[in-house]
Image (spheres, helix red, strand yellow):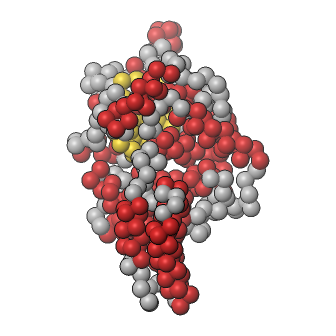
């Protein structure tokens, strides 16, 4: 992207911090939804769409409704079925205009074309007339209202479904959702915490405006000034690897994936993106069968542990096994970029070990030894 400033303005940083504060506020009402909120923050910064997959009853509607309420706008929420009519989403026919002037148009006040955030449950259940209109609204941000083409203020549309569609005719529509996340039930492993949250949860969304739509629009434009030069080679390598492994990525996903990286950098208050800002790409897969491959490839390049922030900490044994495997990935003669990537991952493991298993001196010493050996390879490269 172009003409990167040396730092974001105080206005931009303040808006980003309020967006993250909104995520933390909403998180207080839920269990195991930190990653979903992280991705929602990236989605609204990038002005991209997100798909939540999983069974009913996991709080998806409440999560999005509460989050959208903090964006200074009431979300448009609908449950779709095979019998949903276009008027239920886009508005009823303006009968007086048709009778008096012979003009066909619909009244969009309070409907999806007037919304900044929308949540559509069972998104793949609707018929072709709705899906075709949604394609234009989501991709081009316009709504064809009779003979008029009106811009829509949509920031992000969040869809929910039990799973990805099997019908090939729905694949083009599904591809508009750049981010995907599976939202599992949490009751089995965290029942007491879930019940405690439920007892303390108030009804409805938080109407406090943490960050306004105009600020989000500005932040979306600011992404064009993010400096991606440091991560473009890694991104190119990642895409090439995934395509080589048979992962399905449309040209649209490959191009727009860079916006996710820029949004992650802005969310971290950085103008210049770093490899760690590749993390949202772990959720830009097309086919759920490819999700583990994508997540592992992103994890290796982002230098993160790859753990879901909602999952319990990993055992010392598991951390050590991963560190040993990483240490064997590079040898004398390995490219400096490969050695540097392994070093980032090893340092991330060491941080995780210190956080989750403080006092395990032997484990820390072994990981430190592996890092020293890897550093020596980098010095000889």
Which quadrant of the rendered structure holds the N terminus? bottom right
Q: In the rendered view, would you say 359 is above or below 121?
A: below
- Whole-percent x, y for residue 101 in the image: 51, 13
- Could you say which quadrant of the image residue 249 lies in? bottom left
Q: How many marks?
A: 0
Q: In the rendered view, would you say 17 is above or below 323?
A: above
Can I make out residue 100 in this image?
yes
Q: Residue at x 50, y 21 (%)?
A: 200
- Could you say which quadrant of the image residue 82 lies in? top left
Q: Residue at x 44, y 16 (%)?
A: 92
Q: Is residue 46 left or right of residue 254?
A: right
- Whole-percent x, y for residue 248 in the image: 31, 58
Q: In the rendered view, would you say 118 is above or below 272?
A: above
- Could you say which quadrant of the image residue 6 lies in? bottom right
- 114, 198: nearer the viewer: 198
- Whole-percent x, y for residue 257 in the image: 48, 56
- 79, 349: nearer the viewer: 349
Q: Residue at x 39, y 40 (%)?
A: 51
Residue at the farthest right position? 10
- Whole-percent x, y for residue 131 in the image: 35, 34
Q: Residue at x 52, y 58 (%)?
A: 358
Q: Is residue 134 left or right of residue 9?
A: left
- 328, 16: nearer the viewer: 328
Can I make out residue 145 in this image?
no
- 336, 68: nearer the viewer: 336
């Amino acid at each position: 992207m172009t003409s990167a400033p040396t730092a974001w303005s105080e206005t931009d940083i303040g808006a980003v911090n309020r967006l993250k504060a909104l995520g933390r506020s909403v998180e207080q009402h839920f269990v195991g939804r930190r990653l979903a909120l992280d991705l929602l923050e990236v989605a609204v910064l990038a002005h991209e769409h997100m798909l939540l997959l999983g069974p009913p009853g996991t709080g998806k509607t409440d999560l999005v409704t509460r989050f959208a309420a903090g964006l200074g706008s009431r979300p448009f929420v609908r449950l779709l079925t095979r019998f949903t009519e276009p008027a239920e989403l886009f508005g009823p026919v303006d009968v007086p205009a048709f009778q008096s002037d012979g003009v066909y148009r619909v009244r969009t006040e309070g409907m999806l074309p007037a919304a900044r955030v929308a949540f559509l449950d069972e998104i793949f259940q609707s018929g072709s007339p709705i899906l075709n209109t949604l394609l234009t609204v989501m991709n081009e941000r316009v709504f064809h209202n009779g003979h008029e083409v009106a811009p829509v203020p949509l920031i992000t549309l969040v869809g929910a479904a039990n799973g990805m569609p099997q019908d090939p005719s729905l694949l083009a529509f599904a591809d508009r959702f750049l981010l995907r996340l599976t939202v599992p039930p949490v009751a089995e492993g965290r029942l007491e915490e879930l019940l405690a949250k439920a007892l303390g949860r108030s009804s409805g969304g938080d109407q406090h405006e943490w960050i306004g739509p105009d600020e989000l629009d500005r932040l979306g434009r600011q992404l064009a000034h993010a400096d991606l030069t440091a991560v473009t080679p890694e991104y190119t390598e990642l895409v090439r690897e995934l395509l080589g492994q048979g992962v399905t990525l449309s040209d649209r996903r490959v191009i727009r994936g860079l916006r996710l990286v820029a949004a992650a950098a802005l969310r971290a208050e950085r103008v210049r993106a770093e490899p760690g800002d590749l993390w949202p790409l772990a959720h830009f897969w097309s086919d759920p069968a490819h999700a583990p491959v994508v997540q592992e490839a992103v994890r290796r390049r982002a230098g993160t542990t790859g753990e879901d922030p909602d999952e319990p900490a990993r055992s010392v044994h598991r951390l050590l096994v991963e560190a040993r495997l990483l240490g064997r990935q590079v040898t004398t003669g390995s490219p400096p970029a490969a050695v540097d990537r392994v070093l980032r991952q090893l340092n991330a493991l060491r941080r995780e070990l210190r956080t989750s298993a403080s006092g395990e001196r032997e484990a820390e010493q072994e990981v430190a030894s592996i890092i020293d050996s890897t550093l020596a390879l980098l010095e000889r490269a």
